[in-house]
Image: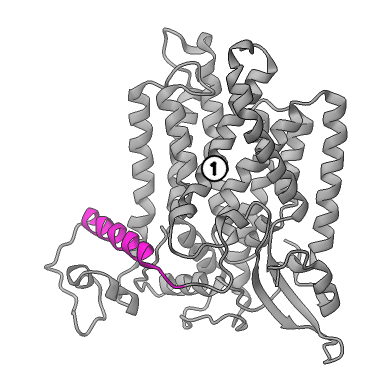
């Protein structure tokens, strides 16, 4: 929550989300290429805080008219803060020792990328929180499935159905924030259907169907709420069909027609079709875009904000800067861990029959394959899309990479594990402190900025 009120102006993509909030408060229909749960959550907090509804456009660097902008920033910060203990719990659920789980949590705690996204009116912290909740609940579900004595030949315990339901609900919530969350629900579904990695046997198909139905209902709920709030027409409504637009008021060219009884399912289908087509049709480039292969090595960031600070002169330009990037130390440790595991994996798989299921290395290989799959699959879509992508798209893959790094440390002998964990956390803290001015917009001069531009494209 430190310095959450700064800057008091619109920062980068806040211009979109602040506008979405204002549209919802005015009950104006607004079109976007992403689902609505994250934006509705921000809008609720803004409504409770008295966010101004008389302004619809928020250009970058424009001061906010009131202090109500703090409410949606606070929501983003709370979701981001929740990711740290969730990371610890996930690591423990994966069988890691407390010291290794602490390292996994430290990766999240000291990650500049997640921290910056969590301090602004953005939805990526919600995305990551729901992804982690999905994974945690799935792991606890599989732990119950893994113990045949728990419910063999009798009704599963209440905890089993509780985690089955929670996994479905949080998976739907993650997808309802951004479709980029799809990899984690996909992996969970594959593990449940085929009994891979964690459970001893596949989840019963009836239970899978029950979870899928619950997830579908939870996924549709934010869309229903979005459509209930969107009663008035706006310029973005032109992306929709004429029949859809006649269900909105305030459109002179296509007046509201109550006889056009368009059902919710019809609206939901049209919205998805239009959003997918619009997303696929985005061809414009962006000066701060980056490629997927640049993300693991932190080669390109995003200049989120810059403004003159007190004491600014032509001779000594003191500015406040927000520059989005990963913790450089974390990026190196994670990239090294992913590369090492990927290189060793063929050798391990070749001699896998010589590794007993009771041997700790069997767990490391099994869990590591799952985490590597999560890392790679989260990058695959960006290898083929034509639209521009940005560093924050790396967040889901980064989470799996951080868990994989902690898992490899956990596989080491205890003394080595503890010593290396201390060294890694020390490097994370040092890098965090050095680049913190780029997160908190502390006043900094040009020479100090140059000293922090370690990569050619950190310009």
In depth, the one of 80 and 431 nearer the eye is 431
Residue 331, position in %: x, y? 71, 50
Q: Is residue 445 visible?
A: no
Secondary structure mostly seen in magenta is helix
Query: Hey, which residue is sitting farthest bottom in the picture?
Result: 314
Query: Which corner quadrant of the image does residue 287 belong to?
Result: bottom right
The residue stretch that appears in magenta: 264-284
In the picture, measured across the screen, residue 430 lies left or right of residue 121, that is right
Tell me the residue at 72%/31% (across/down). 408
Against 421, residue 243 (above or below) is: below
Residue 35, position in %: x, y? 41, 57
In the picture, measured across the screen, residue 250 lies left or right of residue 43, that is left
- Residue that numbered label 1 is attached to: 376
Instruction: Give the total of numbered labels.
Output: 1
In depth, the one of 1 and 449 nearer the eye is 449
Look at the image and tell me in which quarter the C terminus lies.
Answer: bottom right
Query: Which corner quadrant of the image does residue 185 belong to?
Result: top left
Residue 110, position in %: x, y? 75, 52
- Taking the magenta stretch, the answer to whether it contains residue 161 is no
In depth, the one of 120 and 298 nearer the eye is 298
- Taking the magenta stretch, the answer to whether it contains residue 272 is yes
Tell me the residue at 52%/73% (across/down). 286
Dot 1 falls on a residue whose secondary structure is: helix
Tell me the residue at 43%/58% (across/down). 385
């Amino acid at each position: 929550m430190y310095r959450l009120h700064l800057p008091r102006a619109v920062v980068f993509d806040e211009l979109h989300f602040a506008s979405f909030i204002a549209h919802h408060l005015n009950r104006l229909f607004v079109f976007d290429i992403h689902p609505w749960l994250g934006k509705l959550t921000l809008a609720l907090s803004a409504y409770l805080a008295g966010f101004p509804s008389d302004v619809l456009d928020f250009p970058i660097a424009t001061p906010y008219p009131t202090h109500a902008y703090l409410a949606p920033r606070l929501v983003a910060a709370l979701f981001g803060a929740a990711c740290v203990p969730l990371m610890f719990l996930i690591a423990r659920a994966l069988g890691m020792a407390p010291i290794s789980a602490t390292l996994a949590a430290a990766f999240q705690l000291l990650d500049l990328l997640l921290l910056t996204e969590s301090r602004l009116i953005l939805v990526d912290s919600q995305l990551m929180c729901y992804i982690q909740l999905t994974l945690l609940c799935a792991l606890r579900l599989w732990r119950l499935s893994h113990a045949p004595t728990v419910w063999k030949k009798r009704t599963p315990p209440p905890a089993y159905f509780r985690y089955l339901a929670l996994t479905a609900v949080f998976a739907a919530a993650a997808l309802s924030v951004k479709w980029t969350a799809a990899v984690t629900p996909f992996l969970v579904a594959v593990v449940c259907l085929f009994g891979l990695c964690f459970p001893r046997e596949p989840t019963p198909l009836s239970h899978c169907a029950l979870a899928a139905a619950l997830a579908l209902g939870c996924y549709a709920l934010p869309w229903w709420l979005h459509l209930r709030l969107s009663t008035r027409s706006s310029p973005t409504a032109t992306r929709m069909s004429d029949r859809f637009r006649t269900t909105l008021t305030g459109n002179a060219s296509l007046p509201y027609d109550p006889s056009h009884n368009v059902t919710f399912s019809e609206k939901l289908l049209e919205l998805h079709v239009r959003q997918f087509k619009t997303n696929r049709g985005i061809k414009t480039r962006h000066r701060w875009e980056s490629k997927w292969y640049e993300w693991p090595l932190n080669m390109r960031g995003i200049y989120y904000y810059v403004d003159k600070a007190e004491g600014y002169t032509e001779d000594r330009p003191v500015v406040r800067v927000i520059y989005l990037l990963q913790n450089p130390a974390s990026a190196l440790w994670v990239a090294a861990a992913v590369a090492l595991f990927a290189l060793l994996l063929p050798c391990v798989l070749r001699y896998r029959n010589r590794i007993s299921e009771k041997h700790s290395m069997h767990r490391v290989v099994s869990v590591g394959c799952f985490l590597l799959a999560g890392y790679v699959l989260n990058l695959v879509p960006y290898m083929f899309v034509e639209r521009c992508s940005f560093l924050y798209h790396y967040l889901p893959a980064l989470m799996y990479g951080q868990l994989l790094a902690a898992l490899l440390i956990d596989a080491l002998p205890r003394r080595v594990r503890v010593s290396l964990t201390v060294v890694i956390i020390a490097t994370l803290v040092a890098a965090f402190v050095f680049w913190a001015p780029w997160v908190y917009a502390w006043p900094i001069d040009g020479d100090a900025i140059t000293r922090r531009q370690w990569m050619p494209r950190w310009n």
